[in-house]
Image (cartoon, rainbow, N blue to C red):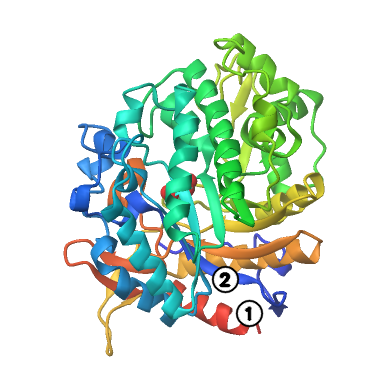
Amino acid sequence: MTVTTRGTLPSYLTEGRAVFPEGFVWGAATASYQIEGAARDDGRGVSIWDRFSHTPGKVAGGHTGDVACDHYHRYADDVRMMTDLGLAAYRFSVSWPRVQPDGAGPINPRGLDFYDRLVDELGTAGITPYVTLYHWDLPQALEDRGGWTSRDTAYRLAEYAQAVHARLGDRVRHWTTLNEPWVAAFLGYGTGVHAPGRTDAASALQASHHFLLAHGLATQALRSAGVDEVMLVINSSPVLTPAQVADPAAEISEADAEAVNRVDALLNRQILDPVLRGRYPDEVLKIVERHGGLDHIHDGDLREINQRLDLIGVNYYNPCAVRSGPGEPANPAFPGTEDVEFATLDVPATAMGWPIHPAGLSQLLVRLSQDYPEVGLMVTENGAAFDDAVTKAEGGDRVHDADRTAYLNSHLRAVHAAIEAGADLRGYLVWSLLDNFEWAEGYHRRFGIVHVDFATQRRVLKDSARFYRDVIKENGFA
Ligand code: FCB
């Protein structure tokens, strides 16, 4: 199926020359549990995603990350592929249970050895590593002691951050504390769709606060070890009514505006305001108060959280569409959203069912740059899952992923438009380098610009990878 989004988009998203600023960082992103495999090698401990994926009924097809892309053993070939694509940067995450099997206590040097080899390989290839310390694979031993509902976990993350930095800090300059704390808290502890699979609004809100505390403490640990650049990666979306998706200038009712504001507070400002302003939005505090209370927010926490930050990493896939919906129950991912309707949009969607709306990325980047001018921005994930087919061709197999190529094309143009409009954007990292373990969706959802045959581990560059390679080479669309 080929979805064409052309014709429904403003022409700046589809046509003409677009050159990016000099030094704009082009790269790709992955995450440890999604690609590494080698789940029992070299002393690696068990993470909440091992436990969750091995629990029947939790992941589509009963898939697990046991083998994934076997990147743990094939990293050198994968780095060669990155070179072939012309990537300047590679964002990967470190598996906490590989480095510290129980999340506390002894460090496992053999786990760190892997990242040591990877960083050296990248160095030889001239590719800059962007290291994410936490992309969701919490050691199960910490979950058994309360996981992110426990304050202690935040302190453990800072200690682990120190250990990783001690080994890699001589070669890694770009550090990210957390990937998408909102998703980890609200899908992990609220809807239960992600590990550890808990379903309690109060727990999700507590987890969210402890993630922010962990970010603040880990940032302090990194700074005292001499780190210059710290980034926090968030899943951010513009919150819009369906009418505003169709026409950004659409007038909306007061009730719709209230729904938009409440969801924006939960999705975006719940994370950004404590981190960058040292305070929670009032709307969020009211909701937390009604769900288990405020006792877990200790005096002084917001000072710990509000540390100097260099970059916000923005993971963008789709807008969040809401409107007033009297009588609607709260969405379990958004405690406190009674009387809000989460709307479906009448636009083309990806295989995840996520609506395609590139203009939302421009709006988001411009808004973040205006509201939080003190930090730079980087798109740390953007991409799409589609059902790909491998076709035999002379000179090797091909994957004609026209949908993904169109998605990337329009979103890169949206990124360019945001820069023109003044957003302080430093780079773009595609999600993802490889088809991989897409969490609760298992291997059925392919986000890679490189196709992976999971039976043979063969990699094939998709057409979207060839397209991306050209964009990188031209630093835009010539
Ligand atoms: C993001 C995750 C990433 C990937 C994409 C599709 O929320 O950070 O690991 O699964 O979604």
Q: Secondary structure at mark 2?
A: strand
Residue 463 x, y percent position in the rendering = 42, 76
Residue drawn at (68%, 48%) of the image: 309
User: Which amino acid, mark 2?
Assistant: Trp
* Distance between mark 1 and mark 2 Cα atoms: 9 Å
Residue drawn at (69%, 46%) of the image: 245
Is residue 350 shown to the viewer in this render? no
Q: Note whether ligand 1 is within 8 Å of mark 1.
A: no
Residue drawn at (57%, 71%) of the image: 26
Q: Nearer the viewer, residue 242 or 193?
A: 193
Q: Nearer the viewer, residue 433 or 326?
A: 433
Is residue 35 shown to the viewer in this render? yes
406 with respect to 140 (left or right): right
Residue 358 x, y percent position in the rendering = 63, 57
Q: Which mark is residue 26?
A: 2
Residue drawn at (42%, 75%) of the image: 82
The residue singled out by tag 1 in the image is 475
Q: Residues within 10 Å of mark 2 (few under 14, many from 20)?
A: many
The quadrant the C terminus occupies is bottom right
> Does the CB distance between marks 1 and 2 fall below 8 Å?
yes
Q: Is residue 314 above or below residue 191?
A: below
Considering every residue shown, the one lying at the far bottom of the view is: 395
Residue 207 x, y percent position in the rendering = 50, 26
- Quadrant position of residue 138: top left
Residue 185 x, y percent position in the rendering = 49, 30
Q: Residues within 10 Å of mark 1 (few under 14, many from 20)?
A: some
Q: Earlier in the sequence, mark 1 or mark 2?
A: 2
Q: Which mark is residue 431?
A: none
